[in-house]
Amino acid sequence: MKKILIIGIGAGNPEYVTVQAVKALNQVDVFFILDKGAGKEKLTAFRQEICRRYIEGREYRFVDAASPEWERGTADYRSTIDELNRDKQAVFERLIGDGMADGECGAFLVWGDPSLYDSTIRIVEAIAGSGAHAIEYEVIPGISAAQALAARHRTTLNRIGEAIEITTGRKIAEGFPNNVGNIIVMLDAENAYKRFADQDIDIFWGAYIGTPDEILISGKLKEVVDDIERVRAAARKANGWIMDTYLMRKSGGVDTERGHRFSRRDQPARQSAEPVAQERSDVKGRLLLCVLHLRCDRTGAVGVRA
């Protein structure tokens, strides 16, 4: 029997790794890593750094494989993701079959929390059910990008008595859900927040959350929408990729009276009643390559009530 641990490692900051995750890391013989390709080397380096920092008195090894390619923007999104996950399952089966021996413990280190817009649990479950390998598996939760975003903005995900929905850029582009005042949006490649700029909505936006190059912007959406688009484009150009998350909230309540806020992780937060135009001129020069996990988008949305 082989044991597989699916370990959530948090949203970019090594200190987001939980005590439970540290204990799990110290059980592992082999870590499986999917190579995301050119420009994403720091994703691997970050996982290796977590192991170096938290594993004590134990030998371990890394086994990697190329992450399957997939076509974005297809008309049939569900079929595309199903095909991607089948390809990933074939890679996982090969890693488990060839990369570890019976009695050993292997692990996948998952950015954020494995239960939120990530396919690792689903794929390992399918392998266990198929009988291709005799495995048992366990899931270790992690701090998600949504949690880290709220903490970094010093706010809550929901207001008292209100619902919150977690969804994707592709789904929010279809419209703001009825009877939900707080929306967390992940995996938005097309700046879907722009379609709501004419409404009375507050936004708490963050890119590279938890990393040294974290960027935060918040305020009335209609007043900061151009700043977010501009900063996001500059970051993507500088780094070759970007991953961001944001909370949109219908106005009303104490969280709506903060004014504009722009901050970077290595600087104090700046807050003002004026737009953040003074911050724009040197954004490109200060953007550095940082680490953030690109996730597979699940369809649908997750709702929670206060």
Image: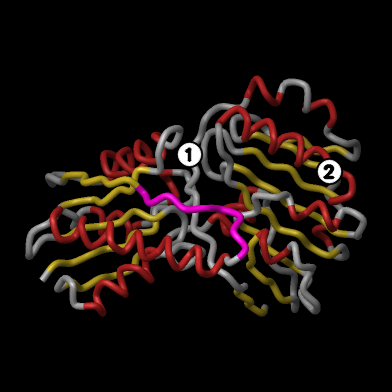
Label 2 with label 1: CB-CB less than 8 Å: no
Placement of the C terminus among the 4 image quadrants: bottom right
* Mark number, residue 291: 1
What amino acid is found at the position of numbered circle 2 in the picture? Val
Placement of the N terminus among the 4 image quadrants: bottom left
Task: Tell which of 136 and 22 is nearer to you.
Answer: 136
Graded by Cα atoms within 10 Å as few (under 14), some (14 to 19) or many (20 or more), the crowding at tag 1 reads many
Picture residue at 76% right of the left edge, 40% below the top:
229
Picture residue at 67% right of the left edge, 33% below the top:
268
Residue 53 image point, x, y percent? 29, 40
Q: For mark 1, give the secondary structure.
A: loop
Picture residue at 23% right of the left edge, 62% below the top:
93
Number of numbered discs on residues: 2
Q: For mark 2, give the secondary structure.
A: helix
Picture residue at 57% right of the left edge, 70% below the top:
299
What amino acid is found at the position of numbered circle 1 in the picture? Val
- Read off the residue under disc 2: 224
Q: Quadrant of residue 274?
A: top right
> What range is drawn magenta here?
67-75
Answer with left or right where residue 220 lies relative to residue 124.
Answer: right
Residue 62 image point, x, y percent? 21, 44
